[in-house]
Image: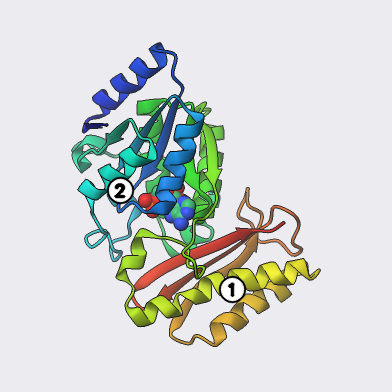
Amino acid sequence: MKIVRTVAELRQWARAQRSQGNTVGLVPTMGALHRGHASLIGAAAAQCGAVAVSIFVNPTQFGPNEDFARYPRTFDADCVLAENSGAAVVFAPIVDELYPAGAVTFVDVEGISARLDGASRPGHFRGVATVVTKLLIAAEPDRAYFGQKDAAQVSVLRRMVTDLRLGTELEVCPIVREEDGLALSSRNVFLSTEERVQALALSRAVRAVEAQVAGGERESGKLIAAALQVFAVEPAIQVDYVELVDWATLKPIETATPGTLFAVAAWVGTTRLIDNTILG
Ligand code: AMP
């Protein structure tokens, strides 16, 4: 597996793949790779002739008081995981490569970027949209792979790819979980033993809502109340949002239908975690 550091090298690699008749898959990540990332890379390897994994802790998607500095960085292990999962190249630029000195160009996906995580993390989706645009322009992949874990991110990026007619197909892979239900996240390493147990409230809330829907409940208020009940018995957790929204627009809805997104974000100590489900 090859490691490249510059946009020019990534572009050259992708062009060479295409000229050899390979379809190109791209898996954007911030590193600290785990089985969730591996599932994306594996899906890309199964569907594309050649797969690039980007590893870049993108400063513009972190707020001033967020965890950019302490975000886990495990580059050597990431390369092993990427290669074992089927990546042909890892693109790992330094910040200056994606944000040249003086950079003032950003991608704003208006409206939708201010909902869910965008509401509590102002500027977050602007940073995400900007960096993913740079990656898609550089690699021009046939398909790019994202996790349903970040469901609101998927909505923002779908809108962006449509609006900019970027021509890349977005593929969404299911949430990979620990055996006890906790969604895998690079941030789970921040959890203390106690917080690790408390964090299960997120997946329990998701399952509670799924159970309500399976039982015939469709009313948004009732479904959200069922989720909040789960958090009520875990006072150490501070709920950020619990919402039932249209997955395309992230606008709140009154009545759940197939494809509705139920999403939750919560603080467990100093760690912010998210989880969700797409209702059947
Ligand atoms: P990150 O490195 O956290 O920016 O994540 C990179 C990609 O991996 C994003 O598209 C995430 O949605 C996806 N991802 C992260 N955790 C999981 C998970 N537990 N299951 C599936 N995909 C995930």
Question: Could you tell whether 134 is left or right of 256 in the image?
Answer: left
Q: Which of the 4 quarters of the picture holds residue 190?
A: bottom left
Q: Quadrant of the N terminus?
A: top left
* Vertical side of 74 occupied by 269: above or below: below
Label drawn at residue 58: 2
Q: Which mark is residue 205?
A: 1
Is 86 above or below relative to 268?
above
**Tag 1 and tag 2, C-beta contact below 8 Å:** no
Question: In the displayed structure, would residue 123 be above or below residue 95?
Answer: below
State the residue at coordinates (34%, 79%).
Answer: 193
Q: Residue at x 51, y 30 (%)?
A: 47
Tell me the SS state at disc 2.
loop
Q: Position of residue 276 (x, y in %)?
A: 56, 62
Amino acid type indicated by mark 2? Asn
Crowd rating for badge 1 (residues with CA inside 10 Å; few <14, some 14–19, many 20+): many
Closer to the camera in the image, 208 or 226: 208
Q: Could you say where residue 86 lies in the image, as x and y percent from the top left?
A: 38, 35
Q: Type of residue at label 1?
A: Ala
